[in-house]
Amino acid sequence: MADDLEQRAEFAGRLARAAGALANRYFRHELDFVVETKSQQDYVSAADRAVETFIRAELARAYPGDAMLGEETGGDVGERTWIVDPIDGTLNFVHGVHFWCVSIAWLENGQRRIGAIYDPCPDELFVAASGAGAFCNGAPIHVSACDSLDRALLSLGYVHRHELETHLALTRELSRAGAAIKDMGAGALMLAQVAAGRYEAFLEPHMHPWDAQAGLLLVEEAGGRVLPYPGPAGVLRGGAIIASNAALFDVLDAAVRRTRSGAAL
């Protein structure tokens, strides 16, 4: 099984790179695409669909017995399931902002086993397999050792389906504690940044599985801590995210609990 996991992880990395190369052709406008809105500030494009179609075809060829769940074309969860976001950070993507990625996770019996996130703009491939560590372009990565909020760089994800007052309350509390706070707009890639030790933590009141699963494994394998995910509604529904280095996890968890007011998901 170890050999199978290693082979799958290598495949996931290659697939993420290939999918990212295709997405990048759209990003650079070598290929034309039309942008649509699913809801307020929630975009989808022909690029998202084309990249997901490419990934689905490659997975079907390599692992025909596995299930696949994708953001754009749906699917289901089975004993062995690939979970895919073809372009995480589509809002950035369609505005020409260089912060988006391809995210691919593999779950076995509901457990995260492989995560691959590819950021084409700086050509960074993040890969993790359960029990084998986390890597960026083949080099080991680790979460940061920062143990104080007044030296921490945090990312708080927010989209319009989240409860605004809860988000603002948490932002105020952490800012008053001295933390620097950003929202880069691509949750999967932010989780990879936490795994690489560039940010101390990423928090969001709810993330879908295609955004969360690969990055959470990266953080875990890089020595970090994550809130149990998914939530009680299961893999398809997703759940809340706290992903940080071990030193700050309990402090952040307590802050979230204090400011929570029933975020609308």
Image: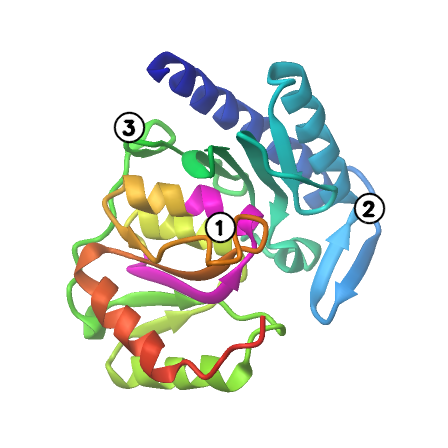
Q: Nearer the viewer, residue 162 or 200?
A: 162
x%, y% of residue 139?
A: 29, 30
Say whether residue 67 is left or right of residue 73: left
Residue at the spot 49% in from the left edge and 80% down from the top edge = 262
Give the Cα separation between the discs numbered 2 and 1.
Answer: 26 Å
> Can you tell which quarter of the image residue 31 is in?
top right
Sequence-earlier tag: 2 or 3: 2
Bounds of the magenta segment: 199-215
Q: Which residue is mark 1?
A: 212
Q: Nearer the viewer, residue 93 or 164?
A: 164
Q: Which residue is mark 3?
A: 132
| Residues tagged 3 and 1 counted as in contact (Cβ below 8 A) | no
Residue at the spot 40% in from the left edge and 47% down from the top edge = 216
Query: Amino acid under label 2?
Result: Phe
Q: Magenta segment: does it hold 204?
A: yes
Relative to 65, is 96 above or below? below
- Visual colour scheme: rainbow
Q: Quadrant of the C terminus?
A: bottom right
Q: Secondary structure at mark 1?
A: helix
Nearest to viewer (mark 2 / mark 1): 1
Q: Magenta segment: does it hold 92?
A: no
Say whether residue 68 is left or right of residue 12: right
Query: Amino acid under label 3?
Result: Ala
x%, y% of residue 125?
A: 45, 34
Say whether residue 2 is left or right of residue 22: left
